[in-house]
Amino acid sequence: MVTERKPAGVGLETWIERQIREAQERGEFEACGRASSEAEVRRILGEVNARIEDAIRRPMSGPPLNLMPFDVEHVVAVWRASR
């Protein structure tokens, strides 16, 4: 979960790349695949989408985020098919 602010003197791209790498190392991008129920998949996606929407609303310097919230129904369908 990204909660810290970008430190002064650290480039935005470098900071974002580090946040992504650390989240990958913690397995946060595999959370939906490991979910044990559809309700858990929906909860995880709800949290992720809320963070994405918050980041989109917040003015930032640097390149655009180019992030879109996940299509919950599509991800749930993929999760169901993988079971």
Image (cartoon, rainbow, N blue to C red):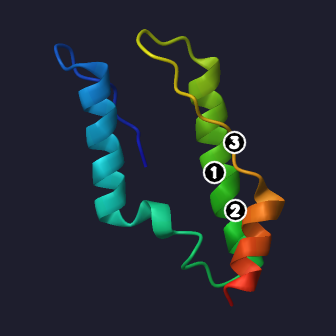
Q: Would you say 17 lies left or right of 8 here?
A: right
Mark 2 vs mark 3: in front: 3
Residue that numbered label 2 is attached to: 43
Residue 38 placement (x, y as % from top left): 76, 77
Check disc 3 and report the residue beneath it: 69
Name the kind of residue labelled 2 in the image.
Arg
Q: Residue furthest right?
A: 73
Q: Residues within 10 Å of mark 1 (few under 14, many from 20)?
A: few
Considering depth in this image, is 55 or 5 the residue closer to the camera?
A: 55
Do residues under tags 2 and 1 come within 8 Å of each other at their CB atoms? yes
Q: Which sits in the foreground, 24 or 44? A: 24
Q: Quadrant of the C terminus?
A: bottom right
**Disc 1 residue type?**
Glu
Q: Is residue 43 left or right of residue 28?
A: right
Q: Amino acid at mark 3?
A: Pro
Determine whether the residue tagged by mark 1 lies in a helix, strand or loop: helix
Q: Residue sitting at 38 percent across and 67 percent down?
A: 27
Circle 2 SS class: helix
Disc assigned to residue 47: 1
Q: Is residue 5 above or below residue 29?
A: above
Q: Position of residue 24 (x, y in %)?
A: 35, 59
Q: Is residue 32 above or below residue 28?
A: below
User: Which of the two discs, 1 and 3, labels the residue nearer the N terminus?
Assistant: 1
Q: Callout 2: 10 Å neighbours few (<14), some, many (20+)?
A: some
User: Which of labels 1 and 3 is toward the front?
Assistant: 3
Is residue 56 depicted above or below 26 in this figure?
Answer: above
